[in-house]
Amino acid sequence: MKYLCLIYVEERLLDTVPAAELTAIEGVWLDYHASLRQSGRMLAGEALQPAESATTLRLRNGKLSLADGPSVDTREQLAGFYLIDAGDLDDAIRLAARIPQGRVGSIEVRPVRPLGLA
């Protein structure tokens, strides 16, 4: 079953983390990324540019409106994701618990709902 692991962090706090700690976290993240890919359980994964680079669009009554920035103002911002293949929710949680960014933010694990599109 597919699960989306959404990685949230407080972007403003990343500027306060010492460079040595960021380097250590990056090393752990690269190891995790490589092991997940090698296991064949990683279907996709990417880091995202900062939330301020987002463009939010809405279509209402046939009219498109655009706004700079994320759609909601929250303490934590979406920083990246993994799309994984896991046996069940417990398996997905075990995999997501190893995502290093969970040490400084949070990881939301959500099952993917198949759309039935070919």
Image (cartoon, rainbow, N blue to C red):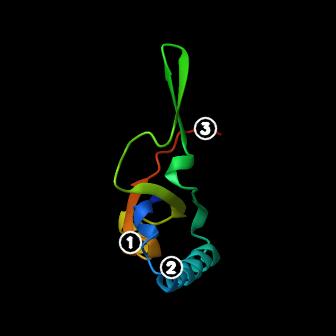
Look at 52% across and 59% down and name the residue there. 81
> Dividing the image into 4 quarters, which one contains the C terminus?
top right
Indicate the position of residue 78 as horizontal and vertical percent values: 46, 55
Q: Amino acid at mark 1?
A: Val
Q: Earlier in the sequence, mark 1 or mark 2?
A: 2
Q: Nearer the viewer, mark 1 or mark 2?
A: 2
Q: CA distance from mark 1 to mark 3?
A: 37 Å
Q: Provide the secondary structure element on which disc 2 rests.
A: helix
Q: Nearer the viewer, mark 3 or mark 2?
A: 2
How would you rate the neighbour count of disc 3 (Cα within 10 Å): few for under 14, some for 14-19, many for 20 or more?
few
Q: CA distance from mark 3 to mark 2?
A: 41 Å
Provide the residue designation for mark 2: 22
Query: Would you say 11 lies left or right of 62 here?
Result: left
Position of 43 relative to 52 (above/below): below
Position of 61 relative to 68 (above/below): above
Which image quadrant is residue 40 in?
bottom right
Position of 98 relative to 85 (above/below): below
Q: Which mark is residue 72?
A: none
Provide the residue designation for mark 1: 104
Query: Would you say 49 lies left or right of 88 here?
Result: right
Position of 13 relative to 67 (above/below): below
Q: CA distance from mark 1 to mark 2?
A: 11 Å
Look at 64% across and 78% down and name the residue there. 38
Front position in the image: 85 or 36: 36
Q: Which mark is residue 117?
A: 3
